[in-house]
Amino acid sequence: MNTPPSPPAAERTGGSSIRSSVRIGALAPLTRPGWFEAGQHLIAGLELAVREVNGAGGIGGRPLELVVRDTAADPQRAAAAVDELAGMGVAALAGEYHSVVARAAAARAEALGLPFLCSSAVLDALTDQPTEWVARLAPAQSHGWRIYADFLLGAGHNRVAVAAQPSVYWASGTRILRDCLAARGGTVIELDMGELDPAAVCDRLVEHRATALLLLTGHPEPAVSIVKSVRHDQRLAEILIGAPAGQPEFTEWAKSLGDDGAAIPFLRYLPERLGPLGARVETALRERLGEAPSFVAFEGYDTVTVLAEVLRSHGVDRARIAESWPRVAVEGTRGQIQFSRTPGISVWQWAWTPVQVVDRDPAAPDRFRILHAG
């Protein structure tokens, strides 16, 4: 492991004032084309945990400081932000929601020798080669999407269409679903959203006799338009629409689609019941956000909880932080967090956070129903 210089004990900020803070860099999509609502929830969780850490004395008496950068779902912008944050002397990097963006950030963090605890991105190949510098809280895509495939097959759906846009993330998800369904006699039908409009999607669903359509597309568009077209096509009254990547988790989905956005199953990384810590954090996040927190907000909180414990135990030296991943044992909002080397995963992985398949209840779209758990 190459050993980069550690961040300075004191940083000069704002004129002549000196603040002896421990800095963590935070990446999140806060503007379009990123899923900005996910970014807002992620930052809310990060900030809540920082406030609580500082209320309990900080890191060895020094305040913990979060330095936030908006990635806007742009890998190049994220890589540039990592360069900037590393130069500012952050002890570690946290956050990011979009997998392709997190992959770019992870590559740059590894090159600079900057520890990165990824909060939300799930792409299995977060780095090209195994690395000591990156750890992850979210479950790998292969784990969560296999659980989603189990849900589909258990509900009797073995002819599944995917409306997909070009992306490493969507292609990986399609491959996972195809392998899982094929092993049990199912079929995945690919619909290229670079060539089809929503009306043509409906025609293809009828032509292929699909019983389920999965949205592997950007949000709000073209996902919202596809849902509206399918919902209002009488030929497709019985078809299941799904969104494994989690678009229906956020209130923007409900506002865009109303009743049409209900009964669309997606993956969520929460236990059936939160423990005392999770329940307390849920209440605080609800007050902070003005709405029910998504699983992404809990991921943010847990990220800082882990990093704070590492910083207290191992100091702010970047190499020592990266070396500490296998020794982490921290109580998070969704269970005990520990990292291990998982076959096929290139980073230190929490295996596994709880996984649910849920949807918005058609009788009360603000309420979620748990359909399956893995």
Image: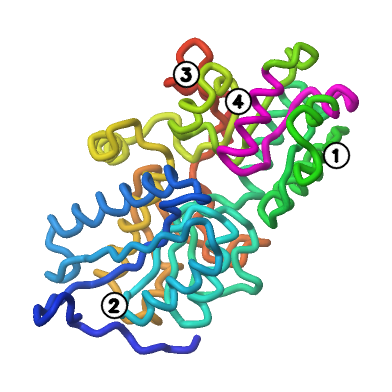
From the top left corner, tell me how far across and down residue 59 is, in percent.
19, 68
Numbered tag placed on residue 365 in the rendering: 3
> Of the residues tagged 3 and 1, which is closer to the observer?
3
Question: Within 10 angstroms of label 1, few (less than 14), some, or many (20 or more) residues?
Answer: few
Q: Which residues are magenta?
A: 204-231
Q: CA distance from mark 2 to mark 3?
A: 45 Å
Amino acid at the residue labelled 2:
Val
Mark 2, secondary structure of its residue? loop
Magenta-drawn stretch contains 225 = yes
Q: What residue is pinned by disc 4?
A: 264
- Location of residue 198 by image quarter: top right
Numbered tag placed on residue 182 in the rendering: 1
Residue plotted at (65% across, 71% down): 128
> Of the residues tagged 4 and 1, which is closer to the observer?
4
Amino acid at the residue labelled 4:
Ile
- The answer to which of marks 1 and 2 sits earlier in the sequence is 1
- Location of residue 183 by image quarter: top right
> Of the residues tagged 2 and 4, which is closer to the observer?
4
Q: What residue is pinned by disc 2?
A: 316
Amino acid at the residue labelled 1:
Ala
Magenta-drawn stretch contains 37 = no
Amino acid at the residue labelled 3:
Pro
Query: Height in image: 91 above or below 63?
Result: below
Mark 4, secondary structure of its residue? loop
Residue plotted at (44% across, 51% down): 31
From the top left corner, tell me how far across and down residue 194 is, in percent.
77, 46
Q: How many marks?
A: 4
- The answer to which of marks 3 and 4 sits earlier in the sequence is 4
- The answer to which of marks 4 and 1 sits earlier in the sequence is 1
